[in-house]
Amino acid sequence: MDERVKTYNDKMQKAYDFMISEFATIRAGRANPHVLDKVRVDYYGTPTPVQQVGNISIPEPRVIQIAPWEKSLIKEIEKAIMASDVGITPSNDGSVIRLVFPELTEERRKDLVKEVKKKGEDCKVAVRNVRRDGNEAYKKLSKTEISEDEIKKLEEDLQKVTDKFIKDIDVAVEEKSRDILKV
């Protein structure tokens, strides 16, 4: 692959990877520790990810258990989860915090699928913007540096890369939608 095309390929890959990480934070009825990725706990005045202040485990399919390394953090972790957009009320027994995921209603599942499709569309827009930027950069190359045929070849290669990412995005959206709709 031409180095000039690879640059834009890498940018498209970053957009795709971001979408996949966003999908991981969408809960699909089963406990998934990634829903806590954006939750920050006030740890001695520093916002710290939950994963760094306790052990996260999944003892049952719909339960996440957080065992803080310091008992004094239980209230802080609970407060951080309540303030986040996780949408689950934590409960604790004095030593561990449990998040019990309720079964999703049909309506909520459909809303989540819409959210997944929107994130997929946003990613496609980002990929197409990268393609546009690449094509504009190719056109700005002077006629002395590169021939018109080479510019056409670069644009075709960039289009192939774009098509591959659009297809990958569609597959990822379809898989995540199927996962959410599975009862």
Image (cartoon, helix red, strand yellow):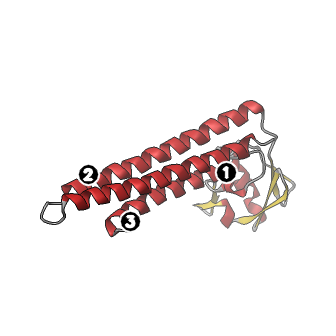
Q: Earlier in the sequence, mark 2 or mark 1?
A: 1
The image position of residue 49, as x and y in percent, is 63, 61
Question: Between tags 1 and 3, which lies in front?
Answer: 3
Residue 84 appears in the picture as rendered:
no
Q: Quarter of the image containing the N terminus? A: bottom left
Separation of disc 2 and disc 1 at Cα? 45 Å
Q: Earlier in the sequence, mark 1 or mark 3?
A: 3
The image position of residue 148, as x and y in percent, is 20, 57
Quarter-of-image position of residue 59: bottom right
Residue 62 appears in the picture as rendered:
yes
Residue at position x 78%, y 49% in the image: 30
- Give the secondary structure at mark 3: helix
Separation of disc 1 and disc 3 at Cα? 41 Å
Q: Amino acid at mark 1?
A: Ala
Residue at position x 43%, y 53% in the image: 162
Q: Which residue is mark 1?
A: 80
